[in-house]
Image (spheres, grey):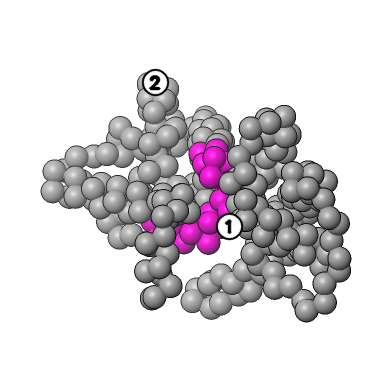
């Protein structure tokens, strides 16, 4: 608890407070407001703000965004599941890729998940018109995008999930493939009330964004001569934090700080983006630690 208080008092607390946690707080607050309005005011928010094929045909384009902030009620289990995913996957993705990329990935996955869901509902409505009236809510498309990005960045990292209250430990890449297969099956055969097509869209966008979107953003940032030192420090901290250095250290090259970052650190960050942190050698981890120390002193 003492550590938490010191963190709260830190002058840089605002910049370090994860956006993933802020999103969770926002979703919880909106869920409480949603349930109060629907229960006491008898206001049907789903009709206007949930995603539906009928609503989209009527020009309610805002539903592509607003459905991501609503959840099924009155019990908060739907919200709880998405918040847990946002917390465990979102924080790590945000620390690794940065706040702007994290937000772009999250909402891009939500939008693309909505597009895939609408396309699926349209196909199903050709056989049964009731599918056009189905209302979709939840942040799960964005969360699935974060899961996909997490699995892409850290494929061998182990994750413990609970299946009917039984803990199961599985590697991130296998969890991604399991989620992808279930989403494909649920999209083809809608056997439940779960928006599997939205999940599928989120997963696909998550991989695409982490693979190509982040790569394009990284290349553009290299062209920016005014890239902040703080951003590089955040990348180095996020990349080197999970590791504890061994006692034996190899000598590192004596280069000026900027040249050291460009020649030694940037290739390592590229390697993390392509293969995950677990792919680093002991020497590469030492270089990241040395870079963090150099930037911190400036």
Q: In screen coordinates, is 36 left or right of 257?
A: left
Residue 166 pos. (x, y %): 53, 78
Q: Give percent across and percent down for residue 205.
A: 62, 40
Q: State the image quarter where residue 254 is shown.
A: bottom right
Main secondary structure along the magenta-highlighted residues: helix
Q: Residue at the location (77% across, 76% down)? A: 246
Q: Kindly identify which numbered label has been placed on residue 59.
A: 2
Q: Secondary structure at mark 2?
A: loop
Could one spot residue 79 in this view of the protein?
yes
Q: Mark 1 highlights which residue?
A: 92
Relative to residue 146, is residue 47 drawn left or right?
Answer: left
Determine whether the residue tagged by mark 1 lies in a helix, strand or loop. Answer: helix
Q: Look at the image and say whether residue 93 sits in the magenta stretch.
A: yes
Choose the circle earlier in sequence order: 1 or 2: 2
Distance from disc 1 to disc 2, alpha carbons, whole Å, reads 37 Å
Q: Return the x and y of residue 13 as percentages of the image width and height.
A: 42, 55
Q: Is residue 150 above or below residue 50?
A: below
Bounds of the magenta segment: 78-107
1 vs 2, front mark? 1
Q: Residue at x 53, y 54 (%)?
A: 90
Q: Depth check: 268 or 130 in front?
A: 268
């Amino acid at each position: 608890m003492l550590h938490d208080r010191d963190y709260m008092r830190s002058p840089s607390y605002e910049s370090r407070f994860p956006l993933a946690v802020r999103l969770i707080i926002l979703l919880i607050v909106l869920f409480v407001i949603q349930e109060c309005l629907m229960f006491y005011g008898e206001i049907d928010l789903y009709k206007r703000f949930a995603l539906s094929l009928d609503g989209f045909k009527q020009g309610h384009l805002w539903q592509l965004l607003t459905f991501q902030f609503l959840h099924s009620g009155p019990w908060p289990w739907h919200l709880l599941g998405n918040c847990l995913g946002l917390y465990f996957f979102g924080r790590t993705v945000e620390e690794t890729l940065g706040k702007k990329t994290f937000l772009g990935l999250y909402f891009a996955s939500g939008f693309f998940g909505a597009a895939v869901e609408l396309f699926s509902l349209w196909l199903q409505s050709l056989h049964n018109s009731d599918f056009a009236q189905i209302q979709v809510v939840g942040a799960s498309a964005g969360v699935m995008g974060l899961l996909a990005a997490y699995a892409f960045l850290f494929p061998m990292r182990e994750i413990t999930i609970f299946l009917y209250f039984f803990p199961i430990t599985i590697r991130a890449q296998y969890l991604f493939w399991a989620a992808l297969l279930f989403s494909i099956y649920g999209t083809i055969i809608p056997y439940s009330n779960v928006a599997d097509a939205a999940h599928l869209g989120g997963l696909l966008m998550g991989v695409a964004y982490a693979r190509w979107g982040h790569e394009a953003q990284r290349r553009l940032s290299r062209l920016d001569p005014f890239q902040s030192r703080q951003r590089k420090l955040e990348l180095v901290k996020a990349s080197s934090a999970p590791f504890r250095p061994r006692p034996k250290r190899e000598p590192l090259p004596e280069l000026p700080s900027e040249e050291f970052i460009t020649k030694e650190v940037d290739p390592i960050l590229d390697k993390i983006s392509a293969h995950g942190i677990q792919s680093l050698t002991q020497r590469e981890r030492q270089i990241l630690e040395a870079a963090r120390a150099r930037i911190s002193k400036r």
